[in-house]
Amino acid sequence: MQQLIWLVAIAGALVALAFAIGALIATVRKKSLSAGAFAVALIASLLILAFGVRHNVVLIAGDIVAWIVAMRILKATTRNKDHASDIVRLSATHMVLLAGTFLFVIPFAWLVSTSLKSDDEQAVFPPVWIPTQQVLVHSVKRPDGTPGRLSTMKDGKEVVEFEELPSGDIKVAPLLPDGSVDKANVITSTRSELTKVRRIEPRWLNYVEALMYLPPDTYYGWTFLKNSLILTVLSVLGTVLSSSMVAYSFARLRWPGREGWFKVMLATMMIPGAVTLMPQFLIFRSLGWIDSLRPLWVPAFFGSAFNIFLLRQFFLGIPNELEDAAKIDGCGPFTTYWKVMLPQVKPALAAIAIMAVLAAWNNFQGPLIYLTSPEQMPMAYGLQLYQQDHAGEPGLMMAASTMVVLPIVVLFFFSQRYFIEGVSLSGLGGR
């Protein structure tokens, strides 16, 4: 019963928050500073109430009061009930979208956060989101030459760790005001008796070590990067050129059996990739392409059924008058395709190019099947090998993963508008 009451209280808090945010939006649109300040105070009070109150009945009462106040503000700052309902619906939609965005960002945030943590923070529970490091005392040197580390005893006294004994105990000495240690009062302490003094400081050295631990014969990862770039560029060129040419033929040219062959091409989308895996391998082996990059990019120049279908829909949406004008000007089929049709389908080409980049950059199965030499491996396969060697070092593993993922994240960040536009227009020719 208590769980049900808490569920009702939380749901009521979310509803009241949606109305309060709607009230704030209405006050901003009306440019009412006093009502806006009151709405901000209402939202802050509701958040404090939701996170600070431990009694569900009190929370429910606070939700009701916040809802009534938000309704009063909405009534005073909107034209009618329909206007108020639209604003509340808008605020609720944005709350849901922000919550979904937060959930999707958590894995990437955890990846970056872990890649910047020191070893003693990797397995801490509850987990640490903001990386910290133990404060170093550079005036004191440990036997290995590294600076001493600042800690506190149970009585609050600050001490410097300057030597770890084979038994696991630690030699510490009190810290003097001038930054040195009182060597006359050196004591031996256990780790449980010490609390590390930490400060917010990401460990960027994880990225340097992640690169330095790569095999030297790969030039510390540059070989993996070069192979990935070659595969990505060639795959994008092959996919865009071949798919657009075939789609243009199916959409704008008239030739015997066109509709029938288009249906056959669509039927190939129903064939699982595992069925064609062995025939492809035998073909490439007979050509002598095993342990080379050619099996990974040459198939891109033979088109893709999905990409051909997508581009065909765009080509069909282009007015016939453009093609007729090109013919009057003396353009042949290829010139019309290159100079008239392709510029009209730029959103679709951008979407296909982005998907081709993702597929080529993240391709792991292909290199696993066709490649055996380390100098031929792309970054996806190199990351798997790195995981086998450094699975027990999550900081280095996450740093290497971040470096592999970061180019794709940056690419999508700058090109997401073209990707969404290309997928959503679906045949409008970018107009």
Image (cartoon, helix red, strand yellow):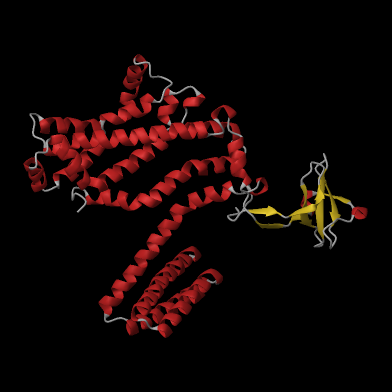
The quarter holding residue 339 reads top left
Residue 285 placement (x, y as % from top left):
37, 16
Name above or below for residue 95 compared with residue 121: below
Number of disc labels: 0
Where 289 sits versus 80, above or below?
above
Q: Within the image, what quadrant is residue 7 found in?
A: bottom left
In the rendered structure, the answer to whether residue 375 lies left or right of residue 116 reads: left
Relative image position of residue 151 (x, y in whole percent)? 77, 56
Q: Residue at x 15, y 33 (%)?
A: 262
Residue located at (59% from left, 43% from top)? 207
x and y, in percent, of residue 94 in the image: 37, 64
Evaluate whether residue 363 shows in this view. no
| Left or right of 262 on screen, residue 272 | right
Left or right side of 207 for 3: left
Residue 306 is drawn in which quadrant? top left
Q: Answer yes or no: is residue 251 visible.
A: yes
Q: Nearer the viewer, residue 61 or 389?
A: 389
Q: Residue furthest right?
A: 184
The residue located at (41%, 83%) in the rendering is 33
Rendered position, 420 above or below 154: above
Which residue is situated farthest in the top direction here? 286
Image coordinates of residue 363 in percent, x first then y, are: 41, 34
Residue at 43 percent of width and 47 percent of height: 409
Locate residue 181 relative to residue 383 in the image: left or right.
right
- Quarter of the image containing the C terminus? bottom left
